[in-house]
Image: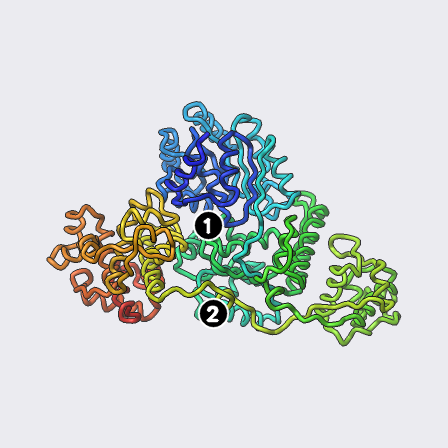
Amino acid sequence: MPTSDSLQQALKQYFGYDSFRAGQREIIEAHLAGRDTLAIMPTGGGKSICFQLPALIKTGITIVVSPLIALMQDQVTALKENGIGATFLNSSLSYRETQQRSQAILNGTIKLVYVAPERLFAEQFLEFLNIIKNSIGIAGFAIDEAHCVSEWGHDFRPEYRQLSRLRQIYPDVPVIGLTATATERVREDIAQQLQLQQPYIHIASFNRTNLYYEVVPKQGTEQSYINLLQQIKRSQGSGIVYCLSRKRVNEISDRLREDGIDAIPYHAGLTPKVREENQTRWIRDDVQIMVATIAFGMGINKPDVRFVIHYDLPKNIEGYYQESGRAGRDGEDSHCTLFMGYQDLETIKYLIAQKVDRHTNEPLEAEQRIAQQQLRQVVDYAEGAICRRTILLRYFGEGFAGECRNCDNCLTPKPMEDWTVESQKFLSCVARAKERFGAGHIIDILRGSLNKKILQHGHDQLSTHGIGKDRSLDEWRQLSRSLIHQGYLTPTTDGYAILKLNDRSWEVMRGQKNVLLPIEREAEPAIASEREQTPDRSVDVDILFERLRLLRKNLADEQEVPPYVIFSNATLNQMAERQPTTRKDFAKLSGVGDKKLEQYADDFMAIIRQHHEKYPPAETSEDDYADPKQKSVAPKSKISKASTQRETLAMYENGADIDEIARDRGLKPATVWTHLVQLIESGYAINCDRLVSPERQTVIYEAIEAIGGDSLRNLFDHLREEYTYDEIKIVRAIWQNEKEPL
């Protein structure tokens, strides 16, 4: 068993972190000791390291079972960026690629192999696993998104049920299951289905303190869209808008684009190629908004999603928690909005009623009851007048005392209105209908309906018929649910099928208790940027952060990876504040491991040194560097001498071309292009005619003026692929300098 110090050393070496998050060390130590393990940790809590770090320490290969191709690719890309041997085997690979990767595994250069559950138990793959076990060894099995194994989970996948075979085939290999969301029932089901033997179970807090929760009422199709548009325009950074249907996804994404918002769709009706392209564009920050069904998002590791909006009502709390939890994985303030519309409720009820056995066409009553119960819990959350966090955490069996001060109910509590008279009418109508009907029928009586069911039962003759015409259908529906939530009515089934009176009902009807109903405002929703933020940094630090962010984006585009794979926003913020100019100091940044230090330190420090020429830093000592608010400094002469970009510039100004500079300096041509782009962005006057002819500069410039310079891919496509990315970057840098000079 590695010592505590050696574990921490490995954490810094491979992942660049100085310390473990809560629970990580205990999970890792249990897994290293050969125990089966179940880790329940919220999105952004650091689940992946809990199996990735042990995989690097243990002898043999760790097999990671993952449900989605995109999830596998994303994690493998991030691991490779940290210098870790990882690969995936799935249907996206050709036969030759599969053979090459299989050989790399057997050669011992790979430590983690990602596979889908369907492939895991294919006869050919099982034979391959036996070869691995006998030649290299299997260190463990990691079951990612383990809630998929449970029919009580929000995303049950039947193919996950066969994972119990792992214990039968490999009884001595430890298994670790990991998920972000699981109630007690789901946790028990996971342990049973995976046949975990006396597992170490870690359940982290589900409280995501950086997320602001709010519920906004839908106010008609057009007004709801206007509210959505306004909220997106006030928000900063990447966001996701979830919709219930493919049709709604297409409508919303089309309208947002018409209104100048960079949005793209994602749903199962699109071809796999289009889905993959759209997901890649969003992850790489080429577009701001992803409008999607719940088919999008599982395992997406993009850490800087600033807001998630559920434009339609979600089907269950677990799904909502996980989908909204895709915001703020980096720990920064983020915003989660749910639009509550009762028409959505009816749509979901209809979909639940369509759950039938595909062989017999008979209703799946058990599944329908579960779905109805889950829907009721969503409505409880949406209509609740108490702290949103209290409701969410209570669902997962976690207590929360007091107010969170980070949700709409805590910050802007709804005024309460006395609805005792309306409640007496409703309860009286339930009594006169002999407690044999559901809320819909009671509301029809109150509103004076003469439909077939009303006439059939003679309910048009009741004294309560038509006494509720002064209230809207939605108002009566809200009251009926509030009466149930407050305990003044008892539904006989999870789906509110039949309403029964209880002792509290009679107290209201006798006038012994008043019923208060929260009233929705028409005020604009709050957004994260309008709430309390950390104190503003100095302007020069913000300027440096933007320049570092642009460098990160350029490097990411060159390598065709998401920007956060290079460095997270948290690391960039720390870099902008500390401003390290030596490798020793750069290595102290959180998120900088050995591989990233070697690969990126020089490029990022060059930007910092150039920044110091315009904004000289205060003198600091070595001891001061430990304080994140202090800045590292190097002598001015040393900065100029060490700048790798200025070496490139000197050679370029002496007449060397790109290939000559790359050859003489031992660099890739792409790196030389990047140096020149960064120098232009920094304000250096460079004669670019040798890089891009004046005629081609004019065409690119006109394209940027026409469609904007945010997306290199869009410019590349607009120019019909007749101009290289390097040419576009050079001209875009000139254009940006003209538009936004430092």
Q: Relative to 305, is 515 above or below?
A: below
Can residue 725 be seen here? The reply is no
Q: State the image coordinates of residue 553 (x, y, percent, origin top left).
A: 34, 56
Please state which of residues 230 and 580 is positioned toward the viewer in this rendering.
580
Q: Relative to 77, is 611 above or below?
A: below
Please state which of residues 131 and 324 is positioned toward the viewer in this rendering.
324
Residue at 65% x, 69% y: name it. Answer: 414
- The three-letter code of the residue at mark 2 reads Lys
- Graded by Cα atoms within 10 Å as few (under 14), some (14 to 19) or many (20 or more), the crowding at tag 2 reads few
The answer to which quarter of the image holds residue 460 is bottom right
Q: How many marks?
A: 2
- The three-letter code of the residue at mark 1 reads Asn
Residue at 71% x, 46% y: name it. Answer: 366
Q: Relative to 294, is 470 above or below?
A: below
Residue where numbered disc 2 is placed: 233
Residue where numbered disc 1 is placed: 301
Query: Along the horizontal axis of the image, is 589 left or right of 368?
Result: left
Q: State the image coordinates of residue 385 (x, y, percent, origin top left).
A: 67, 64
Q: State the image coordinates of residue 345 (x, y, percent, origin top left).
A: 66, 61
Mark linked to residue 535: none
Q: Quadrant of the C terminus?
A: bottom left
Can residue 656 be seen here? The reply is yes
Element at badge 2? helix
The answer to which quarter of the image holds residue 554 is bottom left
Residue at 44% x, 25% y: name it. Answer: 131
How far is the residue under mark 1 from the one under mark 2?
Answer: 24 Å
Residue at 80% x, 57% y: name it. Answer: 490
Q: State the image coordinates of residue 673 (x, y, percent, origin top left).
A: 23, 55
